[in-house]
Amino acid sequence: MASTFLTRTNSSSPSNANITTMSVWIKLSKILGSTEDMGILGSNAGGGYSLAGASQIGFYNGGLYVWLLNSSGTYFKQQSTRLLRDPNAWYHIVVRLDSTQATGNDRIKLWVNNEEITAWSTTNDLAQNTPVNINGTNDIRVGRYTFTDGTHNYFDGSMSHFHLCDGQVYSPTDFGEYDATTGIWKPKTAPSVTYGTNGFFLKFENSGAFGTDSSGNANNFTVNGTMTQTIDTPSNVFATFNALYNSNQNLSNGNLSATNTTSTWNSRATTLAGSSGKYYAEYKVASPGTSYHMLGVGTVEDIDPSTHAGTGTGTVAVYNDNGNKYVEGTDSAYANTYGDGDIIGIALDLDNNYVYFSKNGTWQNSGDPTSGATGTGGISLPTTGTYAFTESVRSTSSSNSKVDANFGNGYFGTTKITSPYNDSNGIGLFNYEPPTNFLSLCTKSLNEQEYD
């Protein structure tokens, strides 16, 4: 969401001012440092951050926290010692506020993926029978809160299944469950919960109206900024660029855009990788002027973030400047050059150990990704192993270097692909039609091809 957030003003009194439950699934786009703040939900009267009745749920100094200010100006705060630092994972966050409880540490409860948070770096129990305000007659902001110094702290990542239940006491099992096959914690898409007067349910499924409330209350929100829709969900996680790499590249757009402002090569691989099956991805060059790109694949243990793709053992890449292929550091003629605005498709066949490259829908070197064991026009993978997609970008004195990736989400940066093509299992959305039986790199595709 980055600098995007949703707003509404509650004009009605809450069902119960002292009780509310929030449930949301989030996927972070950055690794939060120990001094970083990020808002999930903010609420205050009249928009003032220091006014009585202000409430905040989010990250403070890297830990999950709840911050409430009562009518007398006294604040109550719980801040976890646990840090959430996996940019590829969906986290289920449940916050239950119930000031009617007799015991102080029962009045603010937090869970992550059905595991209760019990270790706090800061704790200041909510006073008994204090209004929690998040469900009150306040301004509500999803994806942003304003902290005491007046700065706005935005959520940076993706959200899904956002529930606020006014006056209701619920637990994580009311919103999620364990998958009977995989054992993974997953959302209940239609939980049996009550929302009360000021509650809401944001599915974020309507790209034309992200603020639509699906609770039945019609408590709709207004979108501020530009929000993009993702088909990356807690039930099916898509690959992104891996933010854990020690690379000088700057990531944006949900870690699907990589920019290098330096004149040295830097690389990143995807968060997901496969050892069998067939996968398809697209990169769009987004660098005006002179810049350098090397796009390809590599075994996860051999991709070096401090140099360019195609250098190390088990790596293959195509260079934009001359169209040459690089296989473990050795280059030779292969494809056409490519530049700003061009879309490079990569078909990775791990069943037959070939990789193919296309430019704007035309397979290079007369390649045929469906040729199987013959590998017509493809590049033979130098080794077997677990392969990820990778990219390398290097800037020049005249321009920065940037690439936008589409691993099936249907966007390049913030631009939605018009009339997209599905992959063979109907999940991914691409600018050009993927070869038959080549799938987007996501957990459902990996489960289908790696384990079936």
Image (spheres, rainbow, N blue to C red):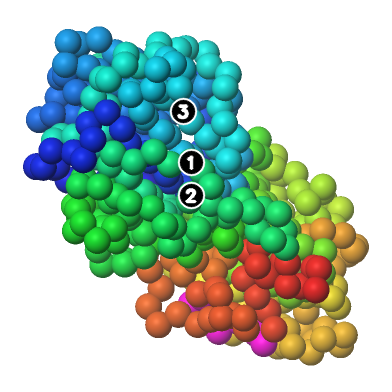
Q: CA distance from mark 2 to mark 1?
A: 6 Å
**Residue 171 numbered tag:** 1
Residue 268: x, y in percent? Answer: 64, 48
Q: Is residue 30 above or below residue 235?
A: above
Q: Seen in the image, is 366 located left or right of residue 122?
A: right
Callout 1: SS = loop
- Quarter of the image with the C terminus is bottom right
Q: Is residue 394 placed above or below 403 in the rendered structure? A: above
Name the side, left or right, on which 14 lies relative to 107: left
Q: Position of residue 120 (x, y in %)?
A: 53, 16
Cα separation, mark 3 vs mark 1, equals 9 Å
Dot 3 or dot 1, earlier in sequence: 3
Q: Which residues are magenta?
A: 430-436
Foreground residue, 388 or 125?
125
- x, y percent for residue 138: 15, 34
Horizontal side of 36 relative to 301 (left or right) equals left
Q: Secondary structure at mark 3?
A: strand
Q: Mark yes or no: residue 293 visible.
A: no
Q: Residue at x 10, y 30 (%)?
A: 46
Q: Residue at x 62, y 81 (%)?
A: 425
Residue 443 falls in image quadrant: bottom right
Residue 431 shown in magenta: yes
Task: Using the image, tell me which numbered label, if any, was put on residue 174.
Answer: 2
Q: Position of residue 20 (x, y in %)?
A: 32, 36
Residue underneath mark 3: 109
C-alpha gap between disc 2 and disc 3 = 15 Å
Residue type highlighted by circle 1: Ser
Q: Are marks 3 and 1 in contact (CB under 8 Å)?
A: no
Q: Observer-nearest residue: 163 or 398? A: 163
Query: Which callout, 2 or 3, points at the residue further toward the start of the chain?
Result: 3
Circle 1 crowding by C-alpha within 10 Å: few under 14, some 14–19, many from 20:
some
Quarter holding residue 376: bottom right
